[in-house]
Image (cartoon, rainbow, N blue to C red):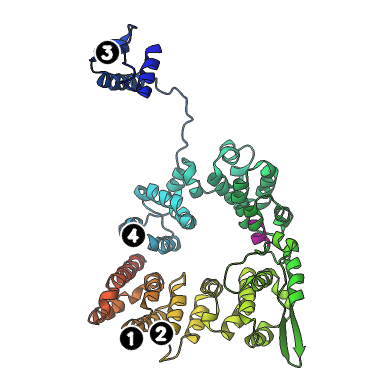
Amino acid sequence: MEWRQRLTSTALIGTDRQTPQPPEAEDALTTVVKQLDWGQPEQALLGAAGAISLHQQVGRQPMNKALPPLVPCSLDDLPCCSARTARHLVVALTEQREVMSELLELMAVAGQRAPHALLPRLLILGQQTAKLRPQISQALGKRGQWLAAQNPAWAYGRVHTLDDFAPEAPDSQKIWREGDRSERALFLQQWRQVDPDTAREALEAIWSSELAKDRETLIAGLSVQLSMADEPFLEKALSDRAQGVRKLAAGLLVQLPESDLCQRMAQRAQTFVQLQTKGKDFKIDVTLPESCEKDWERDGVNPKPPGKAGKRAGWLTQILASAPLDVWQADPAAAIAPAIADNEWRDLLIQGWGLAAWRQHKLDWVDALISQFSLPEFDPDLLADLLALFPSERREQILRDKLPPLRTKDEDLTSWLYQVAQGSQPWSLDFSRLVLKQLLSLLTTSQTNRYKLFYPVRNMALTLHPDLAPEASEVMLALSQEKHFAYWRNTLNEFLSCLTFRQDIHQAFEDTS
């Protein structure tokens, strides 16, 4: 070993300062090394390093460890999808990832599984894209679930029972104790699905010994099966040393209107917003807070809120969004919405009460707010969340009612199309025709702000009814003669390609039904 150390030293300081020497010992390795041309120090040094590396690899003993035999997987109980759908899966994996969710949903409705050959690729996709994991899990079948159990990174694909989380289940408990941050977070979410109280108690038991980042990642798992039983633990977490933990704890508690945090927010909201009755009418008086108190910050109020409304308005918006709507004791359609319409703080009230309605799933409040005000008065993301609470028929009717009149400004129609594009589920064929008509009228007449349409056009390919593809192809062909078409050519070609692919996906299931 001494000559190897000398060679290492020579390599570090350079052959121009120390000449390498051949080894003196006599064994198989040194016999080979001695045969190098040591008159060429650099070449000899590199040759010796290569010989040593090869010797170490050749001399390595094979692992001699008795591995437990694998339990064979059960026979699949779901039929495999058709060969046509299998080809669609390949295209979705390689070229049309954005369509994968819809394809997996169709397979789940049809009670079909993915072919065995595609299981590893699907599991890798789920490893990379968390939002697809529930749908991928449904499409795996017995063999895919067995395969997922062999790799901790694919654990999301396993179907768990209560026994998997018992103390006597060594493999599962090893993940909980020794897994990396993401593995433990996924394990906790799966545990919450089958036994939320025991999972929370397990988290409480190890809480004080966890690093801040681990606490932040793990507490997010309580969003699964969240209930008032979790409130005491979350209330304590409001005083955690880590800001990220405090923020997540507050974000979970505001989803529980009966929690102490929400009741504290209700008291604060009533301090700054008063509803007064004037005959049959309501009047709303708003006073902005002068400062953001420390106990407000503990309850999740951001002292530096984003946006252009100003800090004081931002504080009150957050308070309103976290207060239970029942505290106002008023019919939103008859009292709240008309009163907001004439209030100088209506943007604040719309945003605060709108977010509260979404968190608490108060459809009467959502309906009153949306029917009373125009789409541009809402934050686009919040409005998309509010509309998603309704069935598809009601969403379409709301958007029909909000369609700007003829000869309206381009900006108003662009705003309407942008909101339509925010949908996450396909629209009906009739409504899709209406949307396509409005889109084409804007593309052929608008001369300003056309860049704002790129997002709606791309996302509409995923939300318009797939049977619209032939009609869209015809109108796109006619549009190609317009002088502005070159500006849109690539985007519209991508739009049509995606819509046509979706039509073919749906037809594959209709032809086998």
Residue 85's disc number: 4
Q: Classify mark 2: helix, strand or loop.
A: helix
Q: Is residue 187 above or below residue 57?
A: below
Q: Is residue 135 visible?
A: yes
Q: Which residue is mark 3?
A: 32
Q: Which residue is mark 1?
A: 445
Q: Which residue is mark 2?
A: 410
Q: Amino acid at mark 3?
A: Val
Residue at horizontal 75 percent and vertical 63 percent from the top = 260
Mostly what secondary structure, the magenta segment? helix
Q: Nearer the viewer, residue 174 or 345?
A: 345
- Disc 1 to disc 2, C-alpha distance: 9 Å
Quarter containing the N terminus:
top left
Q: Which residues are magenta?
A: 248-253
Quadrant in the rendering for residue 179: top right
Q: Amino acid at mark 1?
A: Thr
Q: Is residue 212 above or below residue 92?
A: above
- Disc 2 to disc 3, C-alpha distance: 82 Å
Quarter containing the C terminus:
bottom left
Residue at horizontal 49 percent and vertical 42 percent from the top = 152
Quadrant in the rendering for residue 302: bottom right
Q: Residues within 10 Å of mark 1 (few under 14, many from 20)?
A: few
Which of pointers 1 and 4 lies earlier in the amino acid sequence? 4
Q: Residues within 10 Å of mark 2 (few under 14, many from 20)?
A: some
Residue at horizontal 40 percent and vertical 92 percent from the top = 407
Classify residue 201 as left or right of residue 33.
right
- Disc 3 to disc 4, C-alpha distance: 60 Å
Q: Are marks 4 and 2 in contact (CB under 8 Å)?
A: no
| Residue sitting farthest toward the front | 17
x then y, percent, for residue 130 = 48, 54
x then y, percent, for residue 233 = 72, 53
Q: Amino acid at mark 2?
A: Asp
